[in-house]
Amino acid sequence: MQSGSDAVLRRMHRKYRPWHYREKIEKIRTAMPSAAIGADVMVGFPGETEAEFAETRHMIEDLPFTYLHVFTYSARPGTPAANLPCQVPTQIARERNRILRELGEQKKLGFMQSFVGQTLDAISLSKSCGADTPVREVGAADVTEALTDNYLKLHLEGRLEPNLWQRAKSSQSRARP
């Protein structure tokens, strides 16, 4: 997505417009209601005004995004954007980044919660060692991490072999987005 502001996209020399992007996302959601939809969003591109940032924020609020990768523009010597006027102060760009990351976390949590109580197909993840192991003890029971086709991470009871499809009922999320 990069930006929800037409003016910012034009300064970036992008060939698409916010309404093109919106159309595509809405078509995806219509065709695949449970699809996980993510976007890359840049804040602080030279000349980005408060109003242009608000256009991006509103577009993200309106669209059914599941996750966002928010990054802050940084001038790279020798690039055309590095020489553009009105470079956004770092402190403002960082605050905009924080706002969109929080919005992304809210949208992800809402997406995850929309599946509570549903039975989903998930594949058990491979066994590994270390802190990120997909098989671990929770309380008095072993659980195996599994992943649905729309990237929801589930914890299945028991110690399961990797790469097994399982049907599981999604329960309340204890994890942070």
Image (cartoon, rainbow, N blue to C red):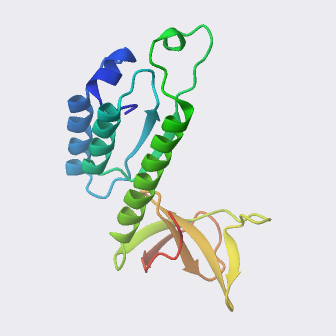
Picture residue at 43% right of the left edge, 36% below the top: 41
Q: Quadrant of the N terminus?
A: top left
Considering every residue shown, the one lying at the far right of the view is: 130
Q: Is residue 106 left or right of residue 155?
A: left
Looking at the picture, how far across and down is residue 57, in whole percent?
A: 33, 43
* Residue 16 seen from this side: no
Looking at the picture, how far across and down is residue 34, in whole percent?
A: 31, 58
Looking at the picture, how far across and down is residue 164, in whole percent?
A: 56, 67
Looking at the picture, how far across and down is residue 47, in whole percent?
A: 40, 21
Based on the displayed image, in which of its 4 quarters is residue 27 positioned? top left
* Residue 150 seen from this side: yes
Give whichever of 50, 174 is nearer the camera.
50
Position of 65 relative to 172 (above/below): above
Give whichever of 48, 23 is nearer the camera.
48
Give whichever of 177, 51 is nearer the camera.
51
Position of 84 relative to 146 (above/below): above
Picture residue at 23% right of the left edge, 29% below the top: 20
Position of 21 relative to 120 (above/below): above
Picture residue at 35% right of the left edge, 18% below the top: 14
Count of numbered circles in the view: 0
Picture residue at 61% right of the left edge, 63% below the top: 125
Q: Is residue 173 left or right of residue 19?
A: right
Q: Is residue 163 left or right of residue 56?
A: right
